[in-house]
Image (cartoon, rainbow, N blue to C red):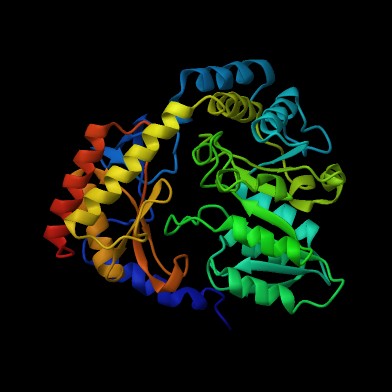
Amino acid sequence: MTDLFSKFDPLIELRTNLLAQGQEDPFNLVMERVVSPTEAICNGRQTILLGTYNYMGMTFDPDVIEAGKQALDDFGAGTTGSRVLNGTYSGHKAVEEALKDFYGMDHAMVFSTGYQANLGIISTVAGKGDYIVLDIDSHASIWDGCKMGDAEVVPFKHNDVEAMDKRLGRIPEGAGKLVVLEGVYSMLGDIAPLKEMIAVAKKHGAMVLVDEAHSMGFIGPNGRGVAEDQGVLDDVDFVIGTFSKSVGTVGGFCVSNHPKFEILRLVCRPYVFTASLPPSVVATACTSIRKLMHAGNKRAHLWENSKTLHKGLKVAGFQLGTAEPQSAIIAVIMPDLEKGAAMWEALLKEGLYVNLARPPATPANMTLLRCSLCAEHTAEQVQTIIGMFQRAGKAVGII
């Protein structure tokens, strides 16, 4: 009889070997207490958090917390229903209004997670007989949305405008076309040349979806993301985002100016067939989004943090994912998984938490230590982090 788990044996062996060496499990860290957006108690140690995507530090904002508490009192713990049945409360409409105001767009649709937003919009908009042209380094939720929708999937080399142009040129005349891009790619923290890519997509008559999960709140004059920063937001048909990064809670969304957009509420399966977000969550998200509209100083400080850390790690001798800082993500490239896991553990013992990212999630089979900075990190904390990396890097033999 076939064991359905046998396909996982190589990964089980890899994990067993890592843990047998006394290595702490990098994918099973427990935070006993979260002290602030930048610090927690992990394994009994005071730890600086540098791997949480809490870019704008909104998780402990007093107004955000108060809004959540009030919604719990007024509406209870959950909706126990879908948005199309009993799961739309005043808070769900309020957060959609906040998103429309934030992006200056006509329509906003909120999902229970960012993953579901990609899954739902992509699989619903592009179906059998349509074509999706996407970057090979796209997030898992984008690939899963393509698979669920049954469209023809045409990947192109990462951030390669010419390759994208060629792929679009080969699609049969008259076929439905959707180009899916990301503003910031979460593994290396690099940004897409959206201005050039969107111009190419429009030349071929394709609709454009941009996932701004890792740029919303931070990049662009109003924090609307890379498309805004490059002056092409008006040419994007769908912007996908999440509440689990800069907004500081959980949930996903799509904003659009398409005149027929509202019909998606009735035909998008990951929206129709799941329970809506709890009232406390949409209340925190709404308050956070409205505050992010006026967060210019926090954005400026986050850029300073990103530049300082990037320069400090580069000078120390680490190999980084980008030549210059392009976002709040700084990826430190490791020689292999074993060294990466050892470096991750050495940093944790120093009192620093980062993400250990490994294949197949990473491009080109790389092992990365992924750092995501926060607007609440102080300049002193960033200098402390650089020192921790230097000590751990020497101890492990990376530098």
Nearer to us in this view, 281 or 398: 398
**In the rendered view, does 234 fall on the left or right side of 214?**
right
Q: Is residue 339 above or below residue 249?
A: below
Direction from residue 318 to residue 391 in the image, left or right = left
Question: How many numbered tags mark residues here?
Answer: 0
Spot the residue most to the bottom: 1
Residue drawn at x 37%, y 42% as measured from the top left: 373
User: Which quadrant, please, contains the N terminus?
Assistant: bottom right
Q: Position of residue 118 (x, y in %)?
A: 66, 53
**Does residue 55 sit above or below 363 in this rendering?**
above
Q: Residue at x 58, y 26 (%)?
A: 284
Residue at position x 77%, y 39% in the image: 82
The quarter in which the C terminus is drawn is bottom left
Question: Does residue 7 lie above or below 132 as drawn?
Answer: below
Q: Nearer the viewer, residue 383 or 311?
A: 311
The answer to whether residue 92 is seen in the rendering is yes
Quarter of the figure with residue 101:
top right
* Nearer to the camera, 328 or 110: 328
Where is residue 13 shown, x and y percent of the image? 36, 74
Which residue is located at x 26 percent, y 50 percent?
A: 311
From where the camera sits, is residue 145 visible?
no
Q: Position of residue 148 (x, y in %)?
A: 73, 64
Q: Position of residue 38 (x, y in %)?
A: 34, 34
